[in-house]
Amino acid sequence: MANIDVTIHKHDVLIVGAGGAGLRAALEASRQVNTAVISQVYPTRSHTVSAQGGIAASLGNVEPDNWLWHMFDTVKGSDYLGDQDAIEFLCRTAPEVVIELEHMGLPFSRIEGGTIFQRRFGGHTKDYGKEAVCRACAAADRTGHTLLHTLFEQCIKNGVAFYNEFFALEILKNEDHVVGVLAWDIVHGGFHIFHSKATMFATGGYTRVYRTTSNAHINTGDGLSLTLRAGLCVEDLEFVQFHPTGIYGAGNLITEGVRGEGGYLLNKNGDRFMKTYAPTVWDLASRDVVSRAMAEEMRHGRGCGEKGDFMLLKLDHLGADLIHERLPGIWDLAHVFAHVDCTKEPIPVTPTAHYSMGGIPTNRFAEVVIGSMDQPEQPVKGFYAAGESACASVHGANRLGCNSLLDIVVFGREGGRKMAAFAASLGEYVPLPDQAGAMGTAEVKNLLATTGKERMDSIWEVLRDTMEKNCGVFRTEETLTAQKQIVEQLCRRFKTVAIDDKSMTYNLDLLETLELGHMLDFSRAIVDGALARQESRGGHYRDDYPKRDDVTWHKHSLAYQEPDGSIRLDYKPVRMKPLTVPTFPPKERVY
Amino acid sequence: MAKSVTFSVFRYDPEQGRKPHYTDYQVDIERPGMMVLDGLNQIRWRQDGTLAYRRSCREGVCGSDGINVNGVNMLSCITHIEDLKDPIVVQPLPSMPVIKDLVVDLTDFYEKFYLVKPYLITKGPPPSDRERLQTPEQRKLLDGLYECILCACCTTSCPSYWADPEYLGPSALLNAWRFIVDSRDDGADERLEIINNRNGAWRCHTILNCVEACPKLLNPTEAIGQIKKTIVQRKF
Amino acid sequence: MLAKYFGSGRSGAFDWYFQRVSGVGLLVTLFLHFFVLHYATEGPLTYAKVMARLSSPAWKAIDITFLVFAIYHAMNGFKLIIDDYVHGTGLRAILIGALWVLAIAFLGLGLLTIVSL
Amino acid sequence: MKVFQAKVRYKLHPGYIAWILHRATGIMLGLYLFLHIWVIHHLGQGEAAFNEVMAVVQSPFFHLMEIGLLGTVVYHGINGLRVVFIDYGNLAKREIMQKAVYAVFAVSALLIIVGAIPMARLALGL
Ligand SMILES: Cc1cc2nc3c(=O)[nH]c(=O)nc-3n(C[C@H](O)[C@H](O)[C@H](O)COP(=O)(O)OP(=O)(O)OC[C@H]3O[C@@H](n4cnc5c(N)ncnc54)[C@H](O)[C@@H]3O)c2cc1C
Ligand code: HEM
Ligand code: SF4
Ligand code: F3S
Ligand code: FES
């Protein structure tokens, strides 16, 4: 077992992750330099494929719209924690990147006249919050699928090198320069060192640490803990978005597009309770607001069912034709996972862990940066991040629907450009460090050599249940302190974990156990960040501190990993100055 | 609900030098609506960690987990256990080389997909400041085609593909047609040139297994029929 | 691997299309043939009855069409099957060649029979 | 890495069965056709030769065989039509495709029975 081959590959640009962000970056970089993508799964299996509702851009195809309104909504949606330079860049670039996607062949739905179909979506309004606006560009309710497939098709056309079913194990650094990644070949077994001039992480989100989640099995946030283990920091992990409408019992997402098309939520008395929580836009308020409203209703005994633990999402009044044309995937999901024909009955829903606002800190060029309250942000040489695994931060404390697909293409593209330029400017490869990959190879070899009774499942079971209970929609000092202890204890148990499968070929046992290690690592950052943040903002709601506190807490949390695995917190200011327009100052958030 | 069902699972580990065999596992039905994937997870997590299979989205949109259950290809994550006859025989997709247990080598399947140029091919530049126009009617032609998730359920169910591994297979052909009918695409000639081949569309004998197998309810046979008619029309 | 898909001779479009055309053609002629032979003719078949029918030029024409369709359809059908199961290019060429020879021989034989009667 | 080719065991769907039957009947018909031409060729050899062949062919056994032939032709022909209409019609539609196969089975069975009655009479000398 001691000898497992190590193969070395060289590529100018290396991208870890083949979701929308990774592929958009690869496409851009491959036009100029030799580019490779490694992914844990075949690219079209990445989680981006699940995205349903749409991608936001102020095209104004259906009604007048304007990128500044989009920017306002995004800043407000972020509960004023978003960095406004990045947000301006995001919203201003949106129409351009969406049109570019169309030119690549993305099969958007269309309206009369042949332009791209747009629908309403939570938190997107016209004229600075007056009423909901049609801004989400959609391909039925399969926008993510079409986006991912289109980008992948273009990558095939451009001859990007893909290493599919490779699992990243370690970030390789020479001094403070990131020079590549160590990975495990899942299919055949064996270590591979990818030596690169510029490396991007686009490894997706981390909400698999929760039991009820809309996320894929592979969304275990590996990129974050790899970053932590490389001595770098992660940002704002305590901000996790709970989407209001996950299918009861299963967690699978019912897109906000359902409410965008005119669906609405009902409590057990048949009341449209959202009118009291968001008098202007009702069911189309921002996600944190709706999720909290639902949780609040259930707390007060107005939930449906025997246990009063779900709400009803009604859409049958939209008519079967519209549902089958615009929301065909939703019909399928409701049918398969809730046994409901949604053209006739409402769908039972509960809030479900959905999106990771936090991630690897970057500036608006997708360069990974390190800063602090009094130290301006400095890029880490050769290291980039984009997509859900990054934190630009355009979503701040709460992401608006449809802004994530936008985020991944805007910053994927930008990162791709920056990497290509950086790689070209670098000339020679920065050499690999001595003992490159020692940590990652040891981790795998140790696991393959383990014997013992502790199994990953019993640890993971506890982790996802307690994270949901103690670090979910509502949090308090008490639950978070308890959770901190639980996670620490689980980390201790994990040290003695053993795997059944000792083989080299497609060792799923090894992978899931590695992933659990990652989840434990960054869960500590989530819990510590949440415990420290004594305010309520966006996705982070503290029952004991129900108000937003801009004086003390208008700042990003940063988490570093100490050698013993514990977390050290630091903070950095919010970048409040947009590129060309005046700042949107923090205001109270009402919908 | 303390019921259990038997999963009879195909096992193969290339490193063990042992012939493939079937192992029976008892899966507890813990809640209504459990999927085959939940059953496999239960086996992996609680009984036998050596079992290997693919999965990702667990909601039938990523196409990772095409397998053969009771002789029919399907996605494990959207197949209800209660709809199946006990014992549930779980096998890898037919006709593909098995890497381990339920994991098969799909290289050939993907290469067939790349072969039909599955990307938009345009001759002229697009309008500089806005999208290409496409009417809702033109867009409708793509419905039932663009939804393909490349799960390989169809191609591996096709007796023509079993008999002739050089056959492009229903999935590649459906994806080719997806681009050929796109009003924005100019690559029909190139693609039809490739497809109009003894191993292209003509190996399809309208067996319809592919239609039965497709978990996304797409219809490769219909797409292949369109391709055949289009080629014939252009020729004669 | 691309090479396999290019330039390997006949495309198959013709085969496919005329398998259908000849099939439908057969359906008509075969029906006539079968019907006349087995139902329209009274009692046991005798040489005289068959000859009487066959010597009319109209019948000869119908029978020739039938023969051509049938031979083409059967031969093409066998070719389809060979294409499915025989992957060696050489062997396939030999088999299909043999099929051609056989088909033409039987076509000749059939034509001879019909014309000479 | 050694890889193993899984054995193919696939459930029979109506369309699959219909195809297997079509192929089987196609082969049988092809073989019969060649035989048939050979036999009929003897017609050219004059009345004596013809009657010799007919003596064999008109036996009850052969009449029963002819029912088999009828079945083969009818199924292959009707199913052939279905195959044509899969492409030049809408019989590939998911909702219709199975019904179309059953319809082919039913129509073939009907035609075979209707057609077989006179033949059976002949065969049994009724
Ligand atoms: C159900 C659902 C619906 C959504 N709907 C919308 C919507 O309508 N609009 C919107 O804007 N957003 C939506 N989102 C959010 C959006 O889809 C995601 O945030 C976005 O797709 C993330 O893309 P990504 O490229 O960052 O990551 P992903 O698509 O998650 O890709 C991650 C990639 O990283 C790879 N990877 C991970 N770890 C490793 C490792 N250790 N080694 C190697 N590779 C690794 C994976 O293989 C994968 O290729 C939705 C999300 C969900 C769950
Ligand atoms: C003398 C009569 C006939 C003979 C000898 C015959 C023979 C064959 C053979 C050998 C095949 C190939 C089978 C396969 O591909 O699996 C075939 C296919 C076919 N036959 Fe016939 N057939 C006859 C009559 C008919 C009739 C009456 C029809 C009706 C329309 C028909 C329609 C077809 C079609 C459409 C195919 C193509 C199947 C495919 O491409 O998959 N045939 N036939
Ligand atoms: S056509 Fe259907 S079965 Fe075939 S690959 Fe696509 S989704 Fe899977
Ligand atoms: S099963 Fe195969 S033969 Fe044609 S109809 Fe489907 S591709
Ligand atoms: S896990 Fe994605 S389709 Fe089943």
Image (cartoon, rainbow, N blue to C red):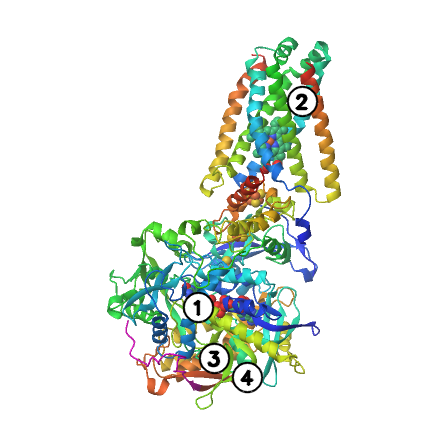
Does the closest atom of ligand 1 sit within 8 Å of the Cβ of label 4? no
Q: Which amino acid type is marked by label 4?
A: Gly
Q: Is residue B154 shown above or below D42?
A: below
Disc 3 marks which residue? A363
**Residue at 64% from the left image edge and 8% from the top image edge:** C48
Tell me the subunit letter for badge 3: A
Q: Main secondary structure of the magenta part?
A: loop
Q: Which SS class for mark 3?
A: loop
Residue density around tag 2, few if under 14, some if 14–19, many if 20 or more, within 10 Å = few
Work out whether mark 1 precedes mark 4 in sequence or the reverse, and give the earlier one.
Answer: 4
Query: What residue did someone put label 1 on?
Result: A406
Of badges 1 and 2, the one in the foreground is 1
Q: Please provide percent x and percent y for residue A285.
A: 31, 68
What amino acid type should be assigned to the residue bearing mark 1? Leu
Q: Earlier in the sequence, mark 3 or mark 1?
A: 3
Tell me which segment is drawn in magenta: A571-591
Location of mark 4 (residue): A231
> Does the magenta portion include A580?
yes
Q: Nearer the viewer, mark 1 or mark 4?
A: 1
